[in-house]
Amino acid sequence: MNRSVGVPRRTNLGFVSRLALVGIALGTASIFGASPTPLLPRVVDVQHELVNDEVKPTRSYLKMRSTKFSTYRDTPVYQVFYVTWDAGPSLAPTTSLIFEYQQERRKVRRAMKVACAAGLRGGKRTTLTIPPSEVAAAGPVKAWRVRLTQGSRTVAQLASPNWNRP
């Protein structure tokens, strides 16, 4: 038995303390959302509004002697969608934003496709407009879906609650 004073006994405390430190670090990283995998692009929010441009009477209109109770039948109405999305750390060159929608008086779904520039980072906002001629012909949009695709693969999607309803 060698019990000399001042010579510490050899233990595995160094290994155990390092293992505990790594466990605490991994637990903290998982709590705060840090992940070892790269972040993919995601669709954050979609807001929309129906815009009614008021037509101002012109001199020729005033010459027709209309009353103050006349209505303007040719008032253009269009619908605007504001898509907020996050590109992540870097966007692939084949990424595109696809906006699919169905209008009230049209059975067929339509789509708009916007190509995204490669290398975009962070939060972005894309504005999509349904022209007045489409709104007049088929009514306002009743259901929509936004997809972010890389090539043929869908990486993010957000849809209105009534998207899958007939």
Image (spheres, helix red, strand yellow):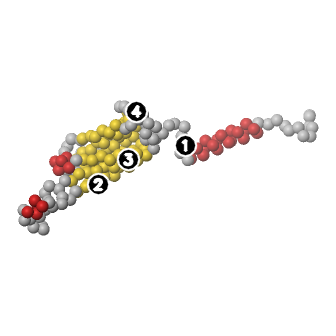
Give whichever of discs 2 and 1 has the lower sequence position.
Answer: 1
Residue 105 in view of the camera: no
Q: Which residue is mark 2?
A: 49
Q: Which residue is mark 1?
A: 34
Q: Amino acid at mark 1?
A: Ala
Give whichever of discs 3 and 4 has the lower sequence position.
Answer: 4
Kindly identify which numbered label has been placed on residue 93. 4
Q: Amino acid at mark 4?
A: Pro
Give whichever of discs 4 and 2 has the lower sequence position.
Answer: 2
Q: Is residue 36 left or right of residue 64?
A: right
Q: CA gap, disc 1 to disc 4? A: 25 Å
Q: Image quadrant of residue 26?
A: top right
Could you tell me which secondary element the residue under label 3 belongs to?
strand
Kindly identify which numbered label has been placed on residue 125. 3
Q: CA gap, disc 1 to disc 3? A: 25 Å
Instruction: Assess disc 4: are there few (<14), some (14-19) or many (≥20) residues with their C-alpha within 10 Å of its C-alpha.
Output: some
Q: Nearer the viewer, mark 1 or mark 3?
A: 3
Q: CA gap, disc 3 to disc 4? A: 18 Å
Is disc 1 in contact with disc 4, using a CB cutoff of under 8 Å?
no
User: Dividing the image into 4 quarters, which one contains the C terminus?
Assistant: top left
Q: Nearer the viewer, mark 2 or mark 1?
A: 2
Could you tell me which secondary element the residue under label 1 belongs to?
loop
Which residue is the extreme one toward the front?
Answer: 59
Q: Position of residue 157 (x, y in %)?
A: 37, 42
Q: Nearer the viewer, mark 1 or mark 4?
A: 4
Q: Is residue 37 left or right of residue 108?
A: right
Q: Residue at x 54, y 37 (%)?
A: 36
Give whichever of discs 2 and 3 has the lower sequence position.
Answer: 2
Q: Amino acid at mark 2?
A: Glu
Which of the two residues, 4 or 123, is positioned nearer the viewer here?
Answer: 123
